[in-house]
Image (cartoon, coloured by chain):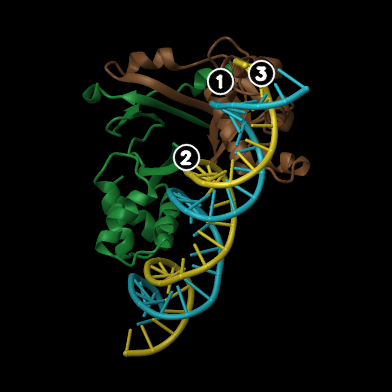
Chain colours: A green, B brown, C yellow, D cyan
Amino acid sequence: MNIEKAWDILKKEGFKKTDKREQILEIFSQTEKYITARDILDVMMAEHPGMSYDTIYRNLSTFVELGILEETELTGEKHFRMQCEAEHHHHHFICMSCGNIKEINYCPMETLQNAIPGYEIENHKFEIYGNCPECH
Amino acid sequence: MNIEKAWDILKKEGFKKTDKREQILEIFSQTEKYITARDILDVMMAEHPGMSYDTIYRNLSTFVELGILEETELTGEKHFRMQCEAEHHHHHFICMSCGNIKEINYCPMETLQNAIPGYEIENHKFEIYGNCPECH
DNA sequence: TTCTAATTCATAATCATTACGATTTACAAT
DNA sequence: ATTGTAAATCGTAATGATTATGAATTAGAA
């Protein structure tokens, strides 16, 4: 997901173009990593000292709803990153040292559904943590 | 995990037998579901009105450290349940209606390690959510 | 340019969790 | 049984992340 595509989505859904949203998207476009609301706040406070918590949290959840950001729960805190471009469903390896992400083009769910017939699967979480080749 | 086994572990590690710990274990032994610290507090407050938050949270994390309870993060809140007896590694299907758990004797990690050579896997999370046969 | 709904600000509230000094208690040693 | 002591709990406050809200501002349509 790039910034232009994010704006397309926002515009199509009737959301306005504000400098706060612009800056939030800018921050996400500059990293592959999962970052927190606080990370965003810290960066934005530097430039707009009067930033409101509300602005960050409201926009983050708007962006997640619209599929612009993806969200995961790492160590008790919500983390966000740009939604992957990949057209196919995939999962992530998350490096615990550098925070970088590797896409994993494999999903165990087909295999799994056979193992539990009668169970209606609605969602699943599959995340792998460790150290990437650069961080060994 | 049953209560006796939990006490064996606690005793072996030098922890004392208290009525609060007894009651916490009792609560967990009566359900298969993942429950929160608040759930425990509510039950215990009824009997011991002067309960301290500290007691619950301290014991829950002690129990997790000792392998008596297992912990997962559901919708931003920590949830706990008795550690499974199963001697082999497994995962869980979590019913979003009734909260019941089904053990899944399948782990995708062997398959996965081959897909990302050079990556050092230290941990993984694999949880499946949906509706169990009883809740369709 | 004006109007209006959307957005942000400023601030407080809430919710889960952690912290800590004072008090109490389990249990080992006497 | 009594005592001593480290462990556990209590009582309460602090912290940290997130949500809520009424007032002020602003983007974008009319």
Task: Look at mark 2 in the image and give the residue it sits on.
Answer: A76
Residue drawn at (74%, 28%), measured in percent from left and top?
Answer: B134
Horizontal and vertical percent for residue B38? 64, 42
Chain name for mark 3: B
State which quarter of the image contains the N terminus of chain A. Answer: top left
Chain name for mark 2: A
Task: Look at mark 3 in the image and give the residue it sits on.
Answer: B7
Tell me the crowding category of disc 3: few under 14, some 14 to 19, or many 20 or more residues within 10 angstroms, Cα based.
Answer: some
Front tag of 1 and 3: 3
Task: Look at mark 1 in the image and give the residue it sits on.
Answer: B67
Residue type highlighted by circle 3? Trp
Judging depth in this view, the residue of A7 and A59 nearest the camera is A59
| Image disc number at residue B81 | none
Chain name for mark 1: B
Residue drawn at (38%, 20%), measured in percent from left and top?
Answer: B122
- Where disc 1 sits, the SS reads loop
Horizontal and vertical percent for residue A109? 50, 23
Front tag of 3 and 2: 3
- Where disc 3 sits, the SS reads helix
Residue type highlighted by circle 2? Gly
Q: Earlier in the sequence, mark 1 or mark 3?
A: 3
Q: Is residue A23 visible?
A: yes
Residue drawn at (33%, 59%), measured in percent from left and top?
Answer: A21
Tell me the crowding category of disc 1: few under 14, some 14 to 19, or many 20 or more residues within 10 angstroms, Cα based.
Answer: some
- Separation of residues labelled 3 and 2 (CA atoms): 29 Å
Tell me the crowding category of disc 2: few under 14, some 14 to 19, or many 20 or more residues within 10 angstroms, Cα based.
Answer: some
Quarter of the image where one finds residue B62: top right
Position of A66 with respect to B70 (left or right) is left
The relative height of residue B54 versus residue A126 in the rendered view (above or below) is below
